[in-house]
Image (cartoon, grey):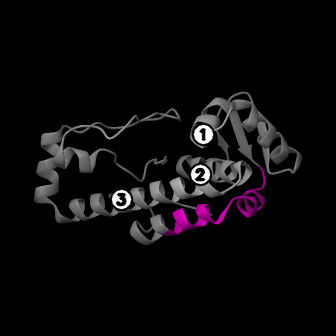
């Protein structure tokens, strides 16, 4: 439903209320992450208003992304949503070559793997991406963004408004 990277922190709201996860979280890209004890998080948020403010702003941006993605999945083509997902992953990794399998993209988009294979083949023939084993390299970012629906830019704008400088969507 939503993607986050180095700009975010997950579990903040559920930690404040129920201490239970809202869903399943999948690590899509290898990297480093930190896990903070709930007691430390609560203490930090209570003592540091700037941290609390940043956490709430990220939570708002993440919620906006989730709601936009739900609406997008209901009304836009698989091709447009696929472009949005590739760009979103690219923005979070800050690399043109992203470790995305067709299986992972299919799960993100709620479609069959064969559908993703067809769509990415079209995108590759258009010169927007190059596929490798378990990777997709963005070769024409502007073209990929033009093929994506307006949801991609709406999500970027929300993050840039709420967390200036935390995410590069360019």
The residue most toward the front is 74
Which residue in the protein does label 2 denote? 73
Verify CB contact (< 8 Å) between mark 2 and mark 1. Answer: yes
Which residue in the protein does label 3 denote? 58
Label 3 environment density (alpha carbons within 10 Å; few <14, some 14–19, many ≥20): many
Q: Earlier in the sequence, mark 3 or mark 1?
A: 3
Quadrant of the rendering where the C terminus is positioned: bottom right
Q: Secondary structure at mark 2?
A: helix
Label 2 environment density (alpha carbons within 10 Å; few <14, some 14–19, many ≥20): some
Helix, strand or loop for the magenta stretch, by majority: helix
Which region of the structure is painted magenta?
139-157
Taking the spot 49% from the left edge, 46% from the top edge, the residue there is 1
The residue most toward the right is 125
Which residue in the protein does label 1 denote? 110
Q: Earlier in the sequence, mark 2 or mark 1?
A: 2
Residue 154 is situated, as x and y percent measured from the top left of the image, at 55, 67
Rounded to the nearest angstrom, the CA distance separating label 3 from label 2 is 22 Å
Res. 99 visible in picture: no
Residue 36 is situated, as x and y percent measured from the top left of the image, at 23, 39
């Amino acid at each position: 439903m939503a993607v986050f990277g180095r700009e975010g922190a997950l579990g903040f709201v559920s930690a404040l209320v129920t201490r239970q996860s809202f869903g399943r979280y999948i690590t899509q890209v290898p990297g480093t992450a930190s896990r903070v004890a709930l007691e430390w998080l609560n203490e930090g948020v209570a003592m540091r208003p700037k941290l609390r403010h940043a956490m709430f702003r990220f939570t708002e941006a993440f919620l906006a992304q989730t709601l936009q993605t739900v609406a997008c999945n209901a009304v836009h083509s698989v091709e447009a949503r696929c472009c949005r997902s590739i760009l979103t992953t690219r923005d979070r990794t800050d690399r043109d070559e992203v470790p995305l399998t067709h299986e992972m993209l299919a799960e993100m988009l709620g479609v069959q793997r064969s559908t993703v294979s067809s769509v990415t083949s079209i995108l590759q023939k258009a010169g927007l991406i190059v596929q490798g084993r378990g990777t997709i390299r963005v070769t024409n970012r502007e073209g990929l963004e033009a093929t994506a629906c307006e949801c991609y830019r709406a999500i970027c704008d929300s993050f840039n408004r709420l967390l200036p400088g935390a995410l590069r969507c360019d």
